[in-house]
Structure formats: structure tokens, C-alpha cells
Image: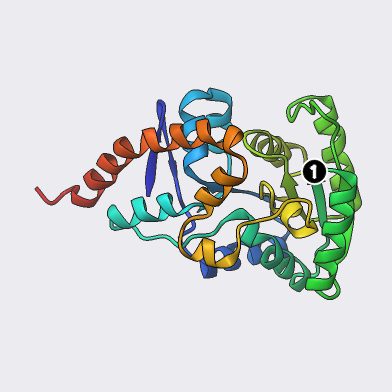
Amino acid sequence: MKFRTGNGEIAVNIATRNALEAEVTDRLSSGRGFALATLNLDHLVKLAADPEFRAAYQRQDLVVADGNPIVWLARLARQPVTLMPGSDLVVPLAHWAAGAGQTVALVGSTDESLRRAAEALRQAVPGLVVACSIAPPFGFDPEGPQADAILRDVAQSGARLCFIALGAPKQELFAARGRVTAPQVGFASIGAGLDFLSGSQVRAPLWVRKLALEWLWRLLSQPRRMITRYALCFSILPGHTIRALRQRFAGQF
């Protein structure tokens, strides 16, 4: 499904987990890099307002649905997609990398969180090698000289899959830059995925996620931080709903 974002469009181009596994495994095995983004309503809000973010997103090779509203809108458009939150993809991606004989890198968060996340990944994926872990300093510019230095370190480590936990839009900007600087590396933007894995942040319980109420859990946990974000997210739903209906009935009249 295509989503309008300002003066452009972003498409969810990987619809299922099986399709993602096949594409990522093929790229890892053949030495072709990629940038993986996980689209949600917060991203759509930012994409409409930020041309640089929009340009970076359009350079992502793989885009999946992160968030039930994206899944529901796609279903409304009769272009169904599977829910694939970035946080749920960390361990599967690590499995696919290990299966392809490739090592991984971790970028983002804090040194302590990355250390614990690396340990958790090695326990979850026997034989996985974490080639490097880098926690950029506060105020890190994903398009500055320091970003290039980190990308060189990732490439020189031999890692072929890099988990980026910088939050949007920094992680997508960094991934887009990495596609040029380290084209053999796959970059996966996974938000708080490493912090959840390390225990630095607490994710909503599974039963809450199954009820599609993770957004409410986060709102109640961090009301000052999340209330404006969710208000903006809800404000764009009517427009995207209308566009989904147009896609549903396109060519029928």
C-alpha cells in the first residue's frame, strides 16, 4: 500500500514475514546491503513535515508495517500486510544473519544497554558474532563526519547487518547514508528494540500487544512525552483512511 507523505508517497513493499526473510537472507548471502524501515503513524506525521526525512525514507530498500493502524489501513485498501514491529524483528534478523554466516553490529542507545543487548542476542542466537557495538554521543548528527566515522568502523568490523537504535528520523537518515558509505551492509532501523532486549526499557506485556493497545500502555507510562505524539497521529488517520478507500475502489468505477 502507498501512503501519501507531503509531496510524495511511501509504499510498504514487504508484505509478509516470509517475504522479508527471503529478501534479507538473499541479500546477506550475496553481499548486497539494504536499508530496512518500519513504517508507523508517527513516521507518517514526521514524513509529511520533514523533507530530509522523506528523502531518506525514499532511499530505504525495504519497508514493513510497524503499527496496527498501518495494517488496518492496508487491509481497508485491500492490500493486506503483516504487522512487523521493529522490536519484534531484532532476534529474527539476527537468526537470518547467523544462518547466512554473517556477523552483526549494534549502533545507538548507551554502552551498557548495547553490552546487555549483545549478550541477550548471543544467548538467543547460538553462534552469533556481534562484531562491534557503538553508542554515539548525545547530539549525534546522523549526517555529519562522526556518522561517516561510525559507518567506516562498522564496515571494517566485517559486520554485514547493522541494527540502528537511534529513533526516527536519525536512524533512517543514518541508514540512508550507510547505503552509500557501506553498501555491503544491511541496516535495520529498530527504534527501542535493543533497549527492550537489554531490559533498559520495559515493553508492554504480550497480552497488551495482542489487544493492539501498546499505544495506550506507552501513553499511560509516559503521558507528557506521548500525548502530543499520539494526538498528531490520530489527526492524520481520517485523511489516510480516505486514501485507503480510494485505493480499494480504484478502477472499479
Residue 35: x percent and y percent? Answer: 64, 47
Q: Is residue 157 visible?
A: yes
Left or right relative to 124: residue 52: left
Residue positioned 23% across, 51% down in the render: 248
Report which quarter residue 219 is drawn in.
top right
Dot 1 corresponds to which residue? 109
- Please state the horizontal and vertical placement of residue 110, each as a whole percent of the image: 85, 43
Q: Residue at x 37, y 33 (%)?
A: 235
Residue 185 visible in the displayed image: no
Does 153 appear above or below 106?
A: above
Q: Residue at x 78, y 70 (%)?
A: 98
Looking at the image, residue 240 lies above or below residue 54: below
Q: Viewed as shown, does residue 83 lie left or right of 206?
A: left
Image side of residue 144 versus residue 157, left or right: left
Three-letter amino acid code at disc 1? Ser
| Figure quadrant of residue 236 | top left
Q: Is residue 63 above or below residue 122?
A: above
Residue 131 percent across, percent down from the top left: 89, 56
